[in-house]
Amino acid sequence: MKIATIISSVLLVSWVILTMVKMWSDVLDSTLYIKLSITMGIIVVATILIALAIKEYGSEKKLKDHNYLD
């Protein structure tokens, strides 16, 4: 979960910088900005979902190892 938080935070900061560049200059085309924003959002959601799945699998395995689950 720690790695997912770091990846999500880095992507959020880079998206904020990207948005500020888009707002204050004409370096990026609007369609490119939208595509990059959607891509970053998809990566963040996928990272968090994968981290949650790994965490859930680890906790379930730990419970099975201690014979709390059948």
Image (cartoon, rainbow, N blue to C red):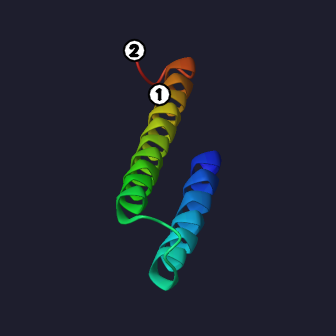
Q: Residue furthest top?
A: 70
x 62%, y 60%: residue: 10
Q: Is residue 1 above or below residue 50?
A: below
Q: Is residue 54 above or below residue 22?
A: above
Binning the other alpha carbons within 10 Å of mark 2 as few (below 14), some (14 to 19) or many (20 upward) gives: few
Looking at the picture, tell me which residue is in the foreground, 22 or 11.
22
Looking at the picture, tell me which residue is in the foreground, 15 or 66.
15
Query: How many tags in the picture?
Result: 2
Q: Is residue 11 left or right of residue 41?
A: right
Residue 55, position as x, y percentages in the image: 52, 37
The answer to whether the residues at label 2 and label 1 have Cβ atoms under 8 Å apart is no
Q: Is residue 49 left or right of residue 51?
A: left
Task: Tell me the tag on residue 32.
Answer: none
Specify the amino acid type for callout 2: Asp
First-in-chain label (2 vs 1):
1
Tag 1 residue: 60
Q: Residue furthest bottom?
A: 24
Residue 12, position as x, y percentages in the image: 53, 64
State which mark lies toward you, 2 or 1: 1
Residue 25, position as x, y percentages in the image: 52, 80
Q: CA distance from mark 2 to mark 1?
A: 11 Å
x 64%, y 50%: residue: 2
Binning the other alpha carbons within 10 Å of mark 1 as few (below 14), some (14 to 19) or many (20 upward) gives: few
Tag 2 residue: 70
Residue 26, position as x, y percentages in the image: 49, 76
Q: Secondary structure at mark 1?
A: helix
Image quadrant where one finds the C terminus: top left
Q: Secondary structure at mark 2?
A: loop
Looking at the picture, tell me which residue is in the foreground, 11 or 70.
11
Specify the amino acid type for callout 1: Glu
x 44%, y 34%: residue: 53
